[in-house]
Amino acid sequence: MIGGIAPDIGWLTILGLSDSAARNLGAVRAAQLSVLHRTALFRFAANMFAALLLIIAFREQIGAQTLYGWLVLTIATTGFNAHDRISARHWADRSATLVNLHRETIGSLLTGLVWCIPIILFAPHADTGGLLALWAISAFLMAVSTAILVTVPVATITFLLLIGFTWAAQLAALGHIIPMVVTLCYTAILVVSAMRSGRAFVLNRVATLELSENKEVVSLLLREFEDENADWLWQTDMQGRMTSIAPRFAAALGKPAEELIGMTLPSMLMSASEDGNAAALAPLIDRLATRTSFANLIVPIDRQGEIRWLALSAAPKTDVHGNFMGFRGVGSDVTAERTSADQINRLARSDMLTGLPNRLSLNEMLSRALEPCGAIPPRCAFLMIDLDRFKAVNDTLGHPLGDRLLGQVAARLNALMAAQDLCGRLGGDEFAVVIRNVAVIEHIDELAQAIIESLSAPYEVDGHSLYIGASIGIAVAPEDGSTPETLVRSADLALYRSKDAGGGRYHRYEPQLHADAEERRALESALHGALEAGQMRIVYQPVISTSAAAIEAFEALLRWDHPELGAVPPYKFIPVAEDTRLITRIGEWVLRTACIEAARWPAPIRVAVNVSPEQLNDPHFVSSVVSALSHSGLAPERLELEVTESIFLREGTGAINILDQVLRLGIRLTLDDFGTGYSALGYLRKTRFSTIKIDRSFVEGAARNNSESLAIIRAVVALAQSLGMSTTAEGAETEEEVKIARQLGCSKVQGYYFGHPMSPAHAAALVNQDASPIAASA
C-alpha cells in the first residue's frame, strides 16, 4: 500500500468489481472516469490511425467491400465511444458509481470485438508481411490501451485479453507456436502492468482525497479553535518574519493582519505598544535568537495607556533534514487573568477589615528592609502594637462595633506614617510598623509616643464614646536582630514588658527580656511536673484580729522548691501557671490540702485560699470546692476564698455566678488587693464579700503619715463598715504600721510583725498550744 494508506482496499475494489464497505469511493470512481474522458479524442485518433494502417496493409489482399465495411464499423464504434465520453467530461466535479465504470468496460469490450474481426478474417489470407503488419497494429493498440485506460484496469484488461487470446488462437491455428507464446507473454505483461498502474492510481487518489479531507478537517478545527478559544495561531519564516497571523491576534495588537505580515514578532509587538517596550521583550528576543522553544512567555503592550498582557508560546519548525524553517506558535490575551491574579495577590497581602498590609506583607517588607546594602548593615525598626482594653469593647458592645473601631485605629495609625514607614495589621487587635532606613534613633521613640497618644484619644463609634489605649514593643536592627524572625520576637518580648508595666507605654527590647523569656520557658517546662514530683508545698501566715489580738485565720500561700532552680518565688511561677492553664490543677491541690490542714485546727480558726481568675473559668470549680470540704470534713464557714478585682473584667466568664454558688455553700469571700486595680465598686454591691484586704502599699504610706494613703484606708474602712464587711491591713511589718491600722479601724492585720509564713506543723502547734503569734521561718 502507498505509504500505508487505505490498507482495506482489495483487488476487487481496485478492478471496479466491488466497492469498499469502509469508505465511499464515489469521488475515486469519478476521478477514474475523468481521466478517460479527457483522453477520449486521443483514443479515437489512435484507433483511426491503426485502422488507416490496416487498410493500407490489406488493400491488395482483402476485398474492398469487406475491408471498408470493417472500417465503417470501427469508425462507428470508436466514434460512439468518443462522443459518449466527451459529452460527460465533468466527472471530476461529480461522484461516479460502479455502473458508470462498467460502461467504460463495455466500451472497451466493443472496441476489442471490432479489432478481433481483422485478426479472425484477414490473418488466414495474409502473407507473411501482411500477418506481421496486422500483429504490429494489434500490439500498438494494446500498448495504447494499457497507457490510456490505466485508470480503469478492468476495461484495459478486457481489451488486452480479448485481442491477446484471439491472436494466440489464430497463431496456433496457423502453426506459428513461437509467435503464439510471445503474444501470450506480451499480453500477460501488459495485463500485469495495467493492474499495477490501475492500483497505483486508485490508491494515490484515495490518499489524495483523504489528505485533502484531513486538511479540511484541520482547517475547520483551527477556525473553530480560533473562533471559540482565547488562543491565536502565528508563524514565521526562517528570517523571523511573520508569514501567518490570526485575525484576532492582529486585532489584539490594534493593527490589520496584512500590515503585520512580513514584520518580525518583536518589531510587531513594539509597534503595537506606545512606549516601544523593548526591555520587556528581551526574553522573547533571546528565545527567538537562540531558536529555542518557549511557553507562556508573558509580554506587556501599552495601548492608549491600557496595559494588555499577552502569553506567547512557540516551537521552532524544521524540515526533513533538520534545517530551521521558522517558528510556529500560539498566543492569547491573558490581561483578565493577570488582573485577577494581581487582585488575588493584593488580597493575600492586605487585611480585609482595615485595608492595611497584613502579616505576610509586613514580613516581606521587613525582609526587604533587612537586605544588606553594601558593607553597611541595614538599620530598621519594627514596632509591635497591642491595643489596651479593646477586648472589653468587643465583649460588651459586640464584634461588629469592634471591627469598626479597628478601622478607625487603622486610619489613625496610617496617618502617622512617613514615606519610609509602613504600618499593617498582624491580626486581632495587634498592629505593627516597619521603619526603613532609621537615621535617628530618637525618631522611633517619637513615633511610638505619637502612636500611643493618637490611639488613646477618644473614638466615636455608632454613638458610643470609646476609650482604649496602646502598648508598643520596639526592636531595632541590627542590634536586636538581623532576621525578620528574631526582630519580631524581640519586639514581642518588648511588648510583653510594656503590657506588664500596665500598658499605655512603649518599651525597647533589652537582652534581659530574652533572658527573662528563657527563664519563663524553663519555668513552664519545669512547672508541668512540679506537682507530681512533690516540689509544691503550702505555708500559712496568720491573720490577727485587732480587737482580740488573737489568731483569727491563716492565709494558705503556695511555695515551689525546685531541685535545680531553687525556691521559685510565687510572682514568677503563678503567672506562668495561669498562662499554661496549670493553675486549675495546682489550685485544686492547694484547696484540698489547705482544707485538710485547717480541719486539724480548733474552731473557729479559718483558712484563706487564693483563687485565680482562671479557676473561676472552670465549670467544675464549685464541685472541686465541695469535694475538698467533704474530703477534709472542714465546715464551710471556716473556708475563705480570696479573689482579686480582675475577675470582674472578664465578661462572659460567669465569675459572679460561680461566686454566688460558693456563697450559698456558706463559704466566705475576701476581695484581695483592693484599691490597686480597677476598684470595681459595683461588684461590692452585687457580691457579698466578708472581707476587703487593703494593700501593703497603703499601710506603709499611712505609717509614714502619707495623706493620700490615710484617706484611702479611711474610705475603704468606712465603705466596708457600711456594707457590713471587715477589713484586713496587709503587709504590717512594724509596730507603727500595726498601730496605725488599729487606729484607722481595720478589723484584722496580717504581716511579718505577727509571723512569717510558716509550715503546717508550726501553724498547728501555734493554734493548738494557744500561743501568742510569733515570727516563724518558712
Image (tube, rainbow, N blue to C red):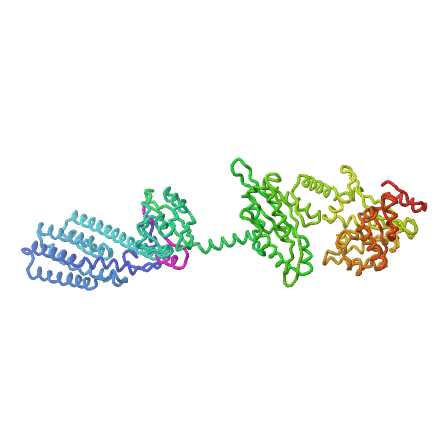
Q: Is residue 228 magenta?
A: yes
Q: Is residue 537 magenta?
A: no
Q: Nearer the viewer, residue 215 or 515?
A: 515
Disc tally is 0
State which quadrant residue 332 falls in. bottom left
Q: Residue furthest left?
A: 60
Asked whether the viewer can see residue 626, the reply is no
Q: Is residue 406 left or right of residue 713?
A: left
Q: Position of residue 452 (x, y in %)?
A: 64, 50
State which quadrant residue 460 falls in. bottom right
Q: Position of residue 473 (x, y in %)?
A: 64, 46
Q: Nearer the viewer, residue 593 or 577?
A: 577
Q: Is residue 27 left or right of residue 415?
A: left
Q: Nearer the viewer, residue 498 or 146?
A: 498
Q: Position of residue 732 (x, y in %)?
A: 85, 46
The quadrant of the rendering that contains the C terminus is top right
Q: Residue furthest top?
A: 375
Q: Magenta residues, as a range?
A: 219-237
